Amino acid sequence: HAYSADSLLSAVNAQLLLNGPPVLIPALATNEAEITRAGQFIAAFTLARVPLFLVVPLQTALLPILTGLLHSGDRVALRRIMLRLAAGIVGLGVVALPLGYFAGPPLVGLIFGQSYVLGGRDIALLAVGVAAHIGLVLVTQVLVAAVRHRLVAWSWLSGVAMAAVILFTVPDLFLGAELAFLAGSATGWLVGTLLVLTTGRRERELQRA
């Protein structure tokens, strides 16, 4: 029962963090201008999420390695791999920032039409948020493979909690949504990374005992 509850909590929070913004923003729009921007936000968010397709091949390559290190208790190797993963995610975010800012608006206009074009800053924030979300998905899948479903739930819950705080404290609805997705994904990724490293330490201590 605990396993089912943790898995359900993880699934709900994962959906809230990734799919909540395009559903919530139109619902919170209060005037015609905000409704128009909500459509632009959905178009930009849809385009920005395309790199999430990278997650599947990354999982295939990384999960067996990281899961093996978790169970073996080799913390040095685990930290090294997690550091490289973090550097890769940060590098992806660094590339996504200018790419989203300069290439995002023309791409949105090309695919969805000029009436759906959102500002470069908005698309850049969403693109960086997607990079952080890739990191979050990867570390939580490592915890799933290690059968640490409660830790998976904590990772997603921390991200959703941070996103909710930002969304309802930033006055600008759309900037708040963009920062909420970015900060929520980054928070969940960092918490998940810490939990992976802690789990590796616990595995080693159990083996010694």
Image: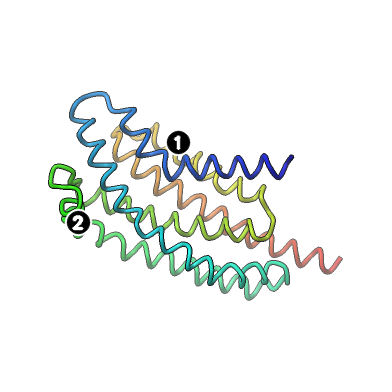
Is disc 2 placed on a helix, strand or loop? helix
Q: Is residue 76 left or right of residue 59?
A: right
Amino acid of disc 2: Leu
Q: Specify the label residue 177 is tagged with.
A: none
* Contact? badges 1 and 2 (CB < 8 Å): no
- The picture quadrant where one finds residue 167 is top left
User: At 67% across and 39% down in the image, what residue appears?
Assistant: 5
Rendering coords of residue 138 (x, y %) = 52, 60
- The picture quadrant where one finds residue 17 is top left
| Callout count | 2
Amino acid of disc 1: Ala
Question: Mark 1 = which residue?
Answer: 164
Q: How is the image coloured?
A: rainbow
User: At 20% across and 46% down in the image, what residue appears?
Assistant: 118
Q: Specify the label residue 107 is tagged with.
A: 2
User: At 48% across and 63% down in the image, what residue appears?
Assistant: 56
Q: Is residue 100 left or right of residue 132?
A: left
